Amino acid sequence: MHTTTTTTPHFLFFILSSLLFSTFFDIAMSFQSETGSSQSETEDETPFSYIEDTGTGPKRWGLINPDWQVCDNGKMQSPIDLLDAKVQVLPNLGKLKRDYKPAPAVVKNRGHDITVIWKGFAGQININGTYFKLKQCHWHSPAEHTFNGSRYNLELHIVHSSSDEKVAVIGITYKYGRPDPFLTRMLRHINSLPVGEEKELEVVNPGDIKFGSRKYYRYIGSLTVPPCTEGVIWTISEKVRTVTREQVRALRMAVHDGFEANARPTQGVNEERTVLFYKPSANGEGGSS
């Protein structure tokens, strides 16, 4: 992320950035409260697909089920293309506050993706004073979010939920290279997991998921699968990590035919939609995330 230094007085910038993010966060929370759609991704992938010529591809998700109409007519849909020229740099967002803990988990083959679901308390993140408990993580290949038009090979979504069922998701993208350690631990379970079934993993430490950078993008969007519920708080790590071709191939081979490529195309961003970017200030200080 390349930015231009401004001469705005520090105290004024601090106040303005605090007001901007407070408003941004309040909009997200109120938007999730007002929506009548489910905050959970659909578990049954049968009615939808990622292939357009099947008639059930992403462009038609909103027509398949009345509860999925926002997939077609929503104004805050995800994923998006993260354009450096469009983002607002906000050092006062602060570093992402994560407090993860090892907990019992299962791995489930949902047909449209592979998901690790924590059954015990696996920790939480803190966004602007609201705690979101870790629920699950899953993979999309290729990556769903893009950076200045560039799409990478894999994306991990780490899903959290607040006490009033608001959703916050952290996204980490990957390109081909060295193996990802967390996925390496999961593969021996994934390779033998039939569609629709789950397997006990005993204790899984979410702290084993590596981020690699404190810099991140944040915006208000939606679930990227039906029902495409809006008001989701997205945090996308700027760091692109690595994964092997074999690891991606294993994820693709495990799911249903037609879901090997399970990435929704990027959605349009209207002029009123704000995308924020956090990077530590020169002295390493920052506010609450």
Image (spheres, rainbow, N blue to C red):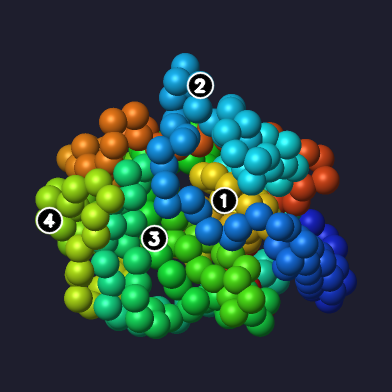
Q: Which mark is residue 55?
A: 2
Give, as a three-letter code, the residue at label 1.
Answer: Leu
Give, as a three-letter code, the residue at label 2.
Answer: Gly
N-term mark: 3 or 1: 3
Q: Are marks 3 and 1 in contact (CB under 8 Å)?
A: no
Q: CA distance from mark 4 to mark 1?
A: 28 Å
Q: Are marks 2 and 3 in contact (CB under 8 Å)?
A: no
The kind of secondary structure element at disc 3 is: strand
Give, as a three-letter code, the residue at label 3.
Answer: Cys
Image coords of residue 232 (percent x, y)? 63, 58
* Label 1 packing within 10 angstroms: few (<14), some (14-19), many (20+): many
Quarter of the picture containing the C terminus is bottom right
Q: Which residue is mark 4?
A: 188
Q: CA distance from mark 3 to mark 1?
A: 13 Å
Q: In the picture shown, does residue 120 fall above or below 105?
A: below
Give, as a three-letter code, the residue at label 4.
Answer: Arg
Q: Seen from this angle, which residue lies furthest top?
A: 53
N-term mark: 4 or 1: 4
Instruction: Please identify, in this view, whether the residue under mark 1 or under mark 2 is nearer the observer.
Output: 2
| One can see residue 94 in this view | no
Q: Which mark is residue 137?
A: 3
The kind of secondary structure element at disc 4 is: helix
